[in-house]
Image: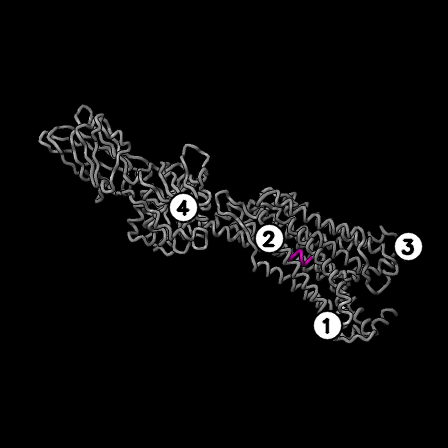
Amino acid sequence: MSRALRGALRRRALLLALLALTLVVVAGTVGVTGFAQAAGTSPTLVVPLLVLGLVAVPSVGRELAVARRDEVALARLRGADVPQVVGRLAGEPLAALLLGTAAGVPLGLLLARASAAAWLDRAAAFVPTPGTVVACLAVVVVGLVGVLVGTAGVVCEPLADQVGTARRTRAAGAGTLFARVLVVVAAVVAAYRSRVVGDGAVDADLVTLAAPALVGLAVGEAAVLGLRLAARAAVPLTARRGTAAFLAVRRLGRAADSAAAVRLLVAAAVVAGLALTGAGAVDGWAEETARLRAGAPLVVEYDGSAAAALRTTRDLDPAGDWLAAAAVVDGGEGAERRAFVDARRLARVSGEHLDPTGAARVAGLARRLPAGRRAVLVEGDRLEVDAVSRGAEPGSLLLSVDYVADADYTETAVLRLDVAPDGTVRGGAAALPGCARGCVATRLLLGPAPGRPAPRVSVRALRVGGTDLLAAGWDPLDPQAALAPDGERRVVTWAGGIGTTGLLGDDVALVPAAAGSVLPVLAAPGASPGATSDPSVGRAPGRAEGEVGTVSGPGGDRRPARVVATLPALPLVEGEGVLADLASAVAASPPGVADSRVLVLARADTPAPVLRALAAEGGGSVRTLDDVAAQVRDATGAAQARAYAVVAVLAAVVAVVAVAAPARGRRAARRQEVAALRLLGVPRPTLRAAGRLDVLGQAVAVAVAGAVGCLAAVALLLPHLPLVRVPRTAVAFDPAADPGALALALLGAVAVCVLVGAGARRVGERHTAPAVLREEVQG
């Protein structure tokens, strides 16, 4: 027992590395799957970490087997066969793997809880799934198999190599070459598969999810091959250019430890660069989507009609500095997705809110949205009429006013005007329920009272409060219905008034003149002709500026529309739909359709008294941009991109541990090499220069291969990874290479390569004296 303990302490660096690798991979697996379970996202994003872990853990196991060559040689000299030796040496790595798994599970649970609390604002109630258990067991099993295979490889080495003090580099066997080719083929298949499965498909398979790690490993293999070929080609060129360069390229062309380091570091750099770029791209997309969905720094749900919201905002903020009413119908597709906002106020209320989005030009174009005629908003509880008779004939006229009440329903107020034989008009007022917060008249209906002749009356004003409903102008809904059989007009309209003739026999309907005017709209790319699948809705506005079509108003009524401009995105409807002026659109519009929402947009610095007054008038809770962004991330699973960044960090840790673990063995081999060269008369400054060139060559290989791999992974894989669920109507998720993220990943890989390489080559004067060789031979 004491002998086994002393041996384990002597190999503690490798055993601790194996323990750390197992712990990191298991903790990452449990943490990411736990976060995914809490967030309702895909737990399979941990696959790249598992791939790197399943490569790194066996590599450390192989180093552990190499470190026990002397025990293997002694066992063979005593007559032990291969299974006995392998079984005898499997105890230490198995204990390390089991301890790492046991410590990784609770650490992963803490990681899941912490990430859920930080990114989801709720704790994670995580129960390990069968997939998580299988993944953790796979780490243990594959790690143990790697150790056993490495041990078997050492056992099968020639006895002379096992008892020798120097580590000889041997040509790769058929199994190693097959594994390397398999990695390259798997990377190509995974890259192709990711494009076939689809952009960000939620059902992406494991091959697609493993693609980043496989591509990184394949690029690492290419980097190792390129480094060796370049070094061997440079040997003749450096033969006459100094001993340092000659020694460096000779070592780069044959050293196996440098190849393993380059391979893992490139793979980790590719995974990290891709994950960090993806996390940044998803955060940027979620931020833009939240800004578009909110429309302004503050959003308030309004309990009432669009007309009431318009009137309320104008009463509370007459100058238009803080509030703007809006209505959104986002349940359709194409031009049926529509938003209406008080365009005269939008620029001041939104401020710089839309500047980082594809709707940055909306504030400047909003001044072109109000139509020539807009709806007349009124507020009050009594309708009063000013009318005069245009003749001495007695009769009675019924004047009905249809309007959308402040609670967003249709109401009708009826006035009866009686004309006496002397021309006096009686009955000039009526109650107007549901108009206390504001309403808009949608139709006037003129007709004779039952059993009475139609008088000739001129209505000069129709007032609610201090506002005249007739000021905006009214036109017949059906011009033919306003004509008598002989072609004479039954109803006469003029600016600020209406009149009836004695020919009025049937009811004649009038609508606001603004209802027939062309509605200017801004269009997003999705609002193209034919974007709607319903042929009954008419032709939607096209993408071409100036094109005329039709759109639905807030209440579903059809309006002629003209495209002012097409933008990549629009506030409130995001990547698909149209935007129009609310005050122009509510003229003659019925109550809002079932999937419509009425909002009030507000500036970030809106005074608190204004917000309190808005709440008293029907406004709900105030939502900030952060609130909307949190809802976007929850709905689209965007938070899992941050979990993917955690996977990148853990993958980098795996690579660092796997590269640094064999440093002690490399340092021993380096001491022997330096001692032998000093025995041949090579000075120490030359050896130090050769070491620096060796490390520089590896660092350049890591940097170049990592950059190529990162750019290829971002271009080929990132758009197809299931990092976020992009709604059909949202702005497109089109990630591009992030120089900052890629530079961070590459600098980290190069720094690890330099530090580990320099540490392995830092040997002291006393340990590299030529006498060391004689002592080792004698020992």
Evaluate if marks 1 and 4 touch, with contact meaning CB atoms under 8 Å apart: no
Q: Going from the N terminus, do you reach mark 1 or mark 2 first?
A: 1
Query: How busy is the neighbourhood of tag 4: few (under 14 within 10 Å), some, or many (20 plus)?
Result: some
Residue 617 seen in the current view: yes
Name which residue type carries label 2. Val
User: Residue 455: x, y in percent?
Assistant: 16, 29
Q: Which residues are magenta?
A: 264-269
Screen quadrant of the C terminus:
bottom right
Residue 336 lies, with reference to residue 108, above or below; the image says: above
Mark number for residue 714? 2
Name which residue type carries label 3. Gly
Discs 2/3, front:
2
Element assignment for label 2? helix
Q: Going from the N terminus, do you reach mark 1 or mark 4 first?
A: 4
Element assignment for label 4? loop
Q: CA distance from mark 3 to mark 1?
A: 46 Å
Q: Which residue is mark 3?
A: 79
Whether the magenta-drawn stretch holds residue 482 is answered as no
Q: Which residue is mark 1?
A: 689
Q: Going from the N terminus, do you reach mark 4 or mark 2 first?
A: 4
Query: How busy is the neighbourhood of tag 3: few (under 14 within 10 Å), some, or many (20 plus)?
Result: few
